Amino acid sequence: MKRFIEGEDRHQVTLLPECLDDFIGEDNPVRVIDAFVDELDLHRLGFKGAAPAATGRPAYHPSVLLKIYIYGYLNRIQSSRRLERETQRNVELMWLTGRLAPDFKTIADFRHDNGVGIRNVCRRFIALCRDLKLFSQAIVAIDSSKFKAVNSRDRNFTPGKIEKRQQQIEQSIQRYLDALEAADRTQPAEIEAKTVRLREKIKTLRQQMRELDSTREKLKSEPDEQLSLTDRDARSMISQAKGTGIVGYNVQTAVDAKHHLIVAHEVTNTGSDRAQLSKMAKAAREAMGRAKLQAFADRGYFNGSEISACEDAGVTPVVPKPMTSSAKADGRFSKADFIYVARDDQYQCPAGERAIHRFTTFEHNLKLHVYWSSACPRCPMREQCTITDYRRIRRWEHEAVLERMQQRLDRRPDAMTLRRRTIEHVFGTLKHWMGSTHFLTKTLEHVSTEMSLHVLAYNLKRVIGVLGIARMMKAVKLAGA
């Protein structure tokens, strides 16, 4: 080993051991975690055990366990058992906790029992970012992504899945019955064992059929006719990224366009985004402390009522309209080819004729005005316009809101590029941190807590990257987080 850098003898006794603080550099992120948590009023934030009990065995202070979890999620260690091992061997965690090493059950129970407090800490960090003037652009991108739950697809049932599974079982039973009939005709001695095995398989399959019939009855009492046995709140959803379905949760986020911080998030078990725009936009506006806000979202969020609600709340939405016109797909004129003349409350068609207002109706709880022109039957362009005698045009009572939004999109051709580069990498980062696994907790409430820890860790890392350790430490202490 000569002429190489040599380590110390493992058995060498050191009379003056090094201080634990010497192992933690001044630019180590654990110092930010320590300063941030120490400035929190955990009792006011809703943590249990913040005030010590008068009797009984002393407990760990919530700040110790919160530091462990923030450190764990910041370093992609989410399991309570892994965190227990890290507290016993990780010098950074030893420094952070003062060499305390809670067992995994204590660590897991803290996350389970303090969901409200953890979610409030996540909100408190966003408020700190607001105080630091990190949300100067007042622009957010809103999007969602599907995250896997503990529940596997085999333990999630819908009427369609049950019907398909029962058809497969019936086919298997018939195949085994045909095999038994063939065995009865041949009757060789060595077939006896196979016959017994086939009868056992048929018996098992028929038992599965009875269980599926029982599950079908249970589905009738479920509001959405869906049942998950492992995690009752998990739902089967279509995942566009994978082109298949997953059983999990739909995580909604609003991300600041300047520093790409997650300013608002919510875990839902609804697969569609149609009804989520105004709720997320309002939450983002409140979190950022802005009277006005621009919100960019993709086509999945296009909903007239939601867009109108955003404008009423002081949020300017920018959402492209889905291309769903069957007329356009068939090579005919779409509604976009008809020009609305607001002064006359009429539409001008491609042939130059005027479609006038005829009556008002209600469809899907929307008030619609219907227009058509008397010239339609004799129009030379009718075949390019409609397959009926008259081309009827429906106009929502708040259609002007959608027209203003389309004008904003026309003025900003890069709107969807801005949305994509702002928010899509956020989900990629979070899923990379989670690895190929799923949420570790069950039910919507506890999954929301777990997601808040992911968001807090993500935001903490982003702000450290923006401000640096020294400025971050100073800001935390000055803000009195």
Image (tube, helix red, strand yellow):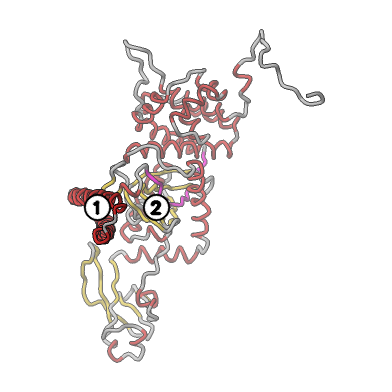
Give the mark toward the camera: 1 or 2: 1
173 relative position to 311: left or right: left
Q: CA distance from mark 1 to mark 2?
A: 61 Å
- Residue at the outermost right position: 3
Q: Is residue 138 magenta?
A: yes
Q: Mark 2 = which residue?
A: 315
Q: Position of residue 434 (x, y in %)?
A: 47, 41
Q: Mark 1 = which residue?
A: 202
For the record, the magenta segment spans 133-149
Along the line of sight, which residue is nearer the eye, 125 or 461? 461
Q: Which mark is residue 214?
A: none
Along the line of sight, which residue is nearer the eye, 127 or 182? 182
Residue type marked 2: Val
Image vertical order of residue 398 relative to residue 481, above or below: below
Q: Is residue 253 magenta?
A: no
Q: Dot 1 lies on which element?
A: helix
Q: Residue at x 35, y 12 (%)?
A: 57
Q: Position of residue 118 (x, y in %)?
A: 39, 32
Along the line of sight, which residue is nearer the eye, 124 or 397? 124
| Occupied quadrant, residue 2 | top right
Residue type marked 1: Ile
Quadrant of the frame with the N terminus: top right
